[in-house]
Amino acid sequence: VTTTRIPVTGGSPYDVLVGHDLTAEVAGMLPGADRVAVITDSAIADRAHLVADSLRQDGRSAELILVPDGEQAKTVNALAGLWDRFGELRMTRSDAVVAVGGGAITDVAGFAAAAWLRGVRVVHLPTTLLGMVDAAVGGKTAINTGAGKNLVGAFHPPAGVLVDLDVLETLPAAQWVNGMAEVVKAGFIADPAILDLIAADPAGAARPDGAHARELIERSIAMKADVVSRDLREAGLREILNYGHTLGHAIEQAEHYQLPHGHCVSIGMVYAAAIGRRSGRLDDATADQHRTILDQLGLPTSYQPDAFPGLLDLMQIDKKSRGSMLRLVVLDGLGKVGMLEDPDPGLLVSAYEEVAA
Ligand SMILES: NC(=O)c1ccc[n+]([C@@H]2O[C@H](COP(=O)([O-])OP(=O)(O)OC[C@H]3O[C@@H](n4cnc5c(N)ncnc54)[C@H](O)[C@@H]3O)[C@@H](O)[C@H]2O)c1
């Protein structure tokens, strides 16, 4: 089976490789890096050991560094620990970081690399679906602080991304489904073929070993690569990636991050579709298709009926907002994205009826 190469262009170009058995490709993505810090967590340390071994076979010195699982990795403490290790390893400008893990690992390792000596190279090996189609591609890195989630970070595009499909063998189905929310988003905002693949085999699409898994991943990455190639720093176009995320982020906050990101975005997309429908921009069939497809994947499509006033407050202070005006990403049709600025409060309330359980 061949490896697919998806280029990300722009100021700091790099390749995303998708395929099997890609561990040995890491060294080639980091020419001249003598010391490599391989950052991972205990759940996927076996995979990271293979990566470190392959770097050593290439004559590099590779050190495995474990950080705590999940969001616990994205703390100031974990970051300080990484920089202490980089110091002990005497990592220089020409050395590099490799992240092996989900979005939490690629976020913290990417930020550690962005700031160490004001920037060393990082290669991401995402091991969750969300990591593959979203977190590892696009160059955003972040940690959480007392002030909130992802408020501190940097734009630091990787030197390369290796999407080794073999890592999916151990990925729990629930983690896969969580990432499918971003895949569905890619379908609605840019690539309706994704929605056709899911509709053709909804049960398969809900599993990492489904027949179309690779195509779903590649199409989603291609969409994100295209958007960030044209707009790395969220000057405009990149905002479309926020489809479903305005209400989604509000629900995440209201739930104190105990509800998975994909679940929140799923509800948020149903809401965004309702806004599109009720503002006369989106046809009924496409609006209805949101709920159908997300339901089929086992993602939630409704939320507490009395929660809207609180969610509206949270939406108004969403960090993606500019100033105090609410901006919502909406659809004018399948694959046609538009913006709704300063929406009518009555519309915001009435659209929530479609989400209220
Ligand atoms: N930088 C970005 O552009 C961006 C985009 C989207 C999300 N994110 C961030 O990504 C994070 C969420 O990422 P996530 O959903 O990948 O979750 P995660 O990184 O927290 O991983 C979830 C769990 O799955 C385990 N795991 C990972 N890969 C595995 C595998 N192959 N087999 C078995 N277990 C495995 C991990 O150990 C962890 O316990 C959030 O912090 C979010 O803010 C960043």
Image (cartoon, grey):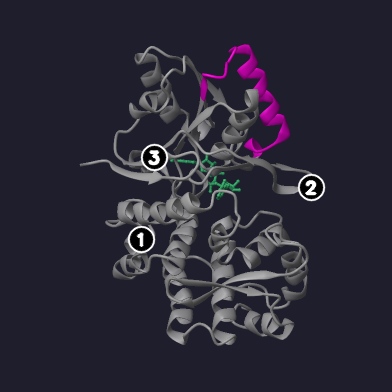
Q: Label for residue 205? A: 1
Quarter of the image that includes the N terminus: top left
**Neighbour tally class for label 3: few under 14, some 14-19, many 20 plus, Cα within 10 Å:** some
Q: Position of residue 346 (x, y in %)?
A: 72, 85
> Quick check: 241 above or below 332?
above
Query: Helix, strand or loop at disc 1?
Result: helix
Tag 2 residue: 147
Which x, y percent locates residue 260?
58, 55
Determine if the magenta segment contains residue 84.
yes
Q: Which residues are magenta?
A: 72-96
Q: Identity of the amino acid at label 1?
A: Ala
Taking the image as drawn, is residue 49 in sight?
yes
Give the alpha-carbon distance from disc 2 to disc 1, as whole Å.
37 Å
Mark 1 against mark 3, which lies toward the viewer?
A: 3
Category of crowding for the residue at label 1, using alpha-carbon neighbours closer than 10 angstroms: few (below 14), some (14–19), many (at least 20): many
Earlier residue among tags 1 and 3: 3
Residue 175 visible to the viewer: no
